[in-house]
Image (cartoon, helix red, strand yellow):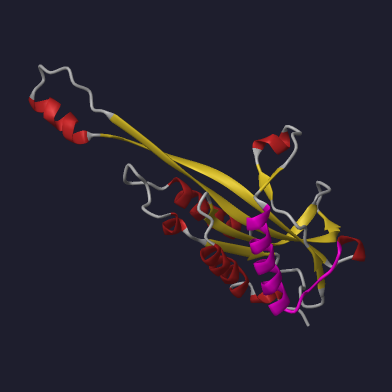
Amino acid sequence: MKKRILSLFGILSALLLWGCYPDGPEYTQDLDIVVTHHNSDYDFVVKATYAMPDSIVKITGNLQEGDRPEYIPDVNAEQILARIESNMTLLGWSKVALDASPDLILLPAAWETTTIYYYYDYWYWWYGAYYPYYPYYPPVYVSSYTTGSLLMTLQDPTQFGGNGNPINQWNGVLNGVLNDSFNATRINGLIDQAFTQSQYLKTN
């Protein structure tokens, strides 16, 4: 299981860092990928309820420094949370309040990544090789783009790991779906895909 998880996140990291052209991918959706994995020893079938916050926190380095957390805009979060809830309902789950002792806690979060590209103009480098008396260095071009991945985690509030933290029973990662141009149709499709490929989450 650990090797599979590392492999999946290796693919995700490779896509985030990929780039052959100075402007990077033409469209953000060119990087769309849905990764899910779960604890195969956990029995989801016997569970029935879950709780979920009404906001989506951003995972940033500031959290480790003790700063106040940031959240994605409410108007976007509401659409994402509604789609997640819809998919959980289709799988047989009932959403309850946190103080109602839910079987699982579903925690959504956003992870922002900035990818930077740089390249040399090799045509001028080649030109300089034929005209060595011109002390010309190839120009370097830099461009970047920022995307935010949506992370979804299901935790059992009664099970903890050796470090005292709750154990993730299921994780879903939607790569590059959150950016300045929020596309609800695109995000909804990827959320649906995450749950479609996680049919083991079905309950009685």
Name the residue at 54% across, 69% down.
189
The spot of residue 104 in percent (x, y) is 81, 65
Name the residue at 15% across, 32% down.
126
| Magenta stretch contains residue 187 | no
| 73 w.r.t. 81: above or below | above
Count of marks overlaid on the render: 0
- Residue lying farthest front? 75
Q: Quadrant of the C terminus?
A: bottom right
Q: Is residue 134 left or right of residue 38?
A: left
Q: Is residue 15 left or right of residue 141?
A: right
Name the residue at 45% across, 59% down.
29
The spot of residue 40 in percent (x, y) is 70, 69
Name the residue at 48% across, 60% down.
32
Say which quarter of the image contains residue 145. top left
Between 119 and 54, which is closer to the camera in this rendering?
54
Between 156 and 91, which is closer to the camera in this rendering?
91
Q: Main secondary structure of the magenta part?
A: helix
Magenta stretch: give its range: 74-97
| 19 w.r.t. 106: above or below | above
